[in-house]
Structure formats: structure tokens, C-alpha cells
Image: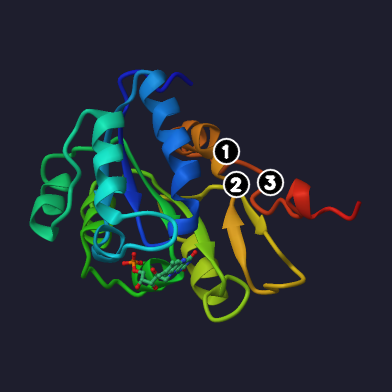
Amino acid sequence: MSLSGKKIGIAFTGSFCTFHKIFTQLEQLVNEGAEVNTIFSDSSQKIDSRFGKAEEFIKKAEEITGNPAILKIETAEPIGPRKLFDILAIIPCTGNTLAKLATGITDTPVLMAAKAHLRNERPLLIALSTNDALGMNMKNIGYLMNAKNIYFVPFGQDNPQAKPNSMIAHTEKLVPSIAGALEGKQLQPIISSPFEDQKPK
Ligand SMILES: Cc1cc2nc3c(=O)[nH]c(=O)nc-3n(C[C@H](O)[C@H](O)[C@H](O)COP(=O)(O)O)c2cc1C
């Protein structure tokens, strides 16, 4: 499926180590002719870390998409009534946002965007990135995987020895995951471990 002309929301949450890979995907979506708008959670728009400054991430997203980022709950709310997106992807999705989504909490611009978008019965795609995927958050992953209109970017263990509960999405599979979800299909296989660089040599 061509993504040309598709209205795509890309929501960032505070898994800062993944941001650089996501900008490559943002560029790809724009190059394919999609109309892309970004949304930032409160943490992702305020925390400066060793991975970069929040303000610079927002600026870069705005430069790539040509659209102002959505940074407040009140500017995310119209996504519902105005049916702004064909699909919304939370990429990266922290354990925090995942757990709140599974329990119906709506206290950040990203969670507001998800709630508003789901009201229109349109696909929501999750690209998780969390150290507790196989721990405290596993029940939430299972719950969301079984929920209507929710899809996952395929994911796997990124460092089973050092971080046995950690799982992250294969960010490079964003475009086919979006294309599948727009047709009501989950890209398979959902679990694809180990990552190439984790295979025994
Ligand atoms: C440098 C740094 C890296 C982080 N990386 C992750 C991560 O990869 N996954 C995760 O679930 N949380 C991570 N966190 C914690 C989240 O940023 C924190 O739980 C925050 O409350 C998430 O809020 P949000 O989900 O609204 O963006 C990280 C925090 C910092 C400071």
C-alpha cells in the first residue's frame, strides 16, 4: 500500500535512546508523501539527556515534517472530533505510556492523542521500548495486543543477557507495520528475536 497522502500521527514518549532511529523513519514517511504530524509526551518535550536536548528533538521533528509539533493536551484533543489521522503510531512507546494506555489514563498529549484517535475506531500502532516488557508491563502488552484497533511494530529482546526483561520494537519495520495496520492487519511475526547483533557469533 502507498502511504502517499495518508495522514499519520507520530507520537514520541521518553525512550530517548531510540529517537535518532525514529527520525530516519520520519524522513522515510515524508519521502513517501505522507502528511506527518508529531506529538510529544510531557517527559519527551522536557527531559534533556545524554541522547540530546528535548528542544532540539522537537525542532528536528518540525523541520522534517514541516508541521508544528503537538505539545499540549488541549491541542491533541481535536484529533478525535476533527479526525486528523488515518493512523497514529506511538514510537517509541515507554513502559509508562504503555501501562497508562492499558488502564485508560489520559494525562499527557500522547495519551490524549491516543484516546482521541481511538474514538474514531482507527488504527493505533505501538512501537514499544522498555526494560520491563517481560516483567511488570507484560500483562499490559498482552492486554493491548488483544484490544480492538491496536497493532504492534514487531519487537524482540534487545539484550537478553544484560537486560533480561527488556524488549524494543524493530523501528525499521515502521512503514510495513503502518501499511498493514491501515488494512486491519498485524505485521507478522510480532516477536522476532534475537536482534541480528545479539545472535551468538
Ligand atoms: C535518559 C533516559 C532514558 C530513558 N529510556 C527509557 C526507555 O527506553 N524506556 C522506558 O520505558 N522509559 C525510559 N525512560 C524513563 C521515561 O522517560 C519515564 O518513565 C517517563 O516518565 C516517561 O514518560 P512518558 O511515557 O510520558 O514519555 C528513560 C528516562 C531517561 C531520563
Dots 2, 1 in contact, CB < 8 A: yes
Percent position (x, y) of residue 38?
27, 43
Nearer-the-camera pick, 187 or 75: 75
Percent position (x, y) of residue 20?
46, 44
Dots 2, 3 in contact, CB < 8 A: no
Where does label 2 land, which residue? 170
Percent position (x, y) of residue 15?
44, 61
Residue depicted at x 26% and y 46%: 58
Where does label 3 land, which residue? 189
Q: Amino acid at mark 3?
A: Pro
Report, in whole angstroms, how far the alpha carbon at label 2 lies from the one at label 1. 6 Å
Quarter of the view holding residue 29: top left
- 54 left or right, relative to 142: left
* Figure label count: 3
Tell me if I can see residue 121 in this picture.
no
Q: Nearer the viewer, mark 2 or mark 3?
A: 2
Identify the residue at the far bottom of this view.
136
Residue depicted at x 60% and y 46%: 170
Q: Secondary structure at mark 2?
A: loop
Residue depicted at x 22% and y 65%: 108
Q: Amino acid at mark 2?
A: His
Quarter of the view holding residue 198: bottom right
- 199 left or right, relative to 102: right
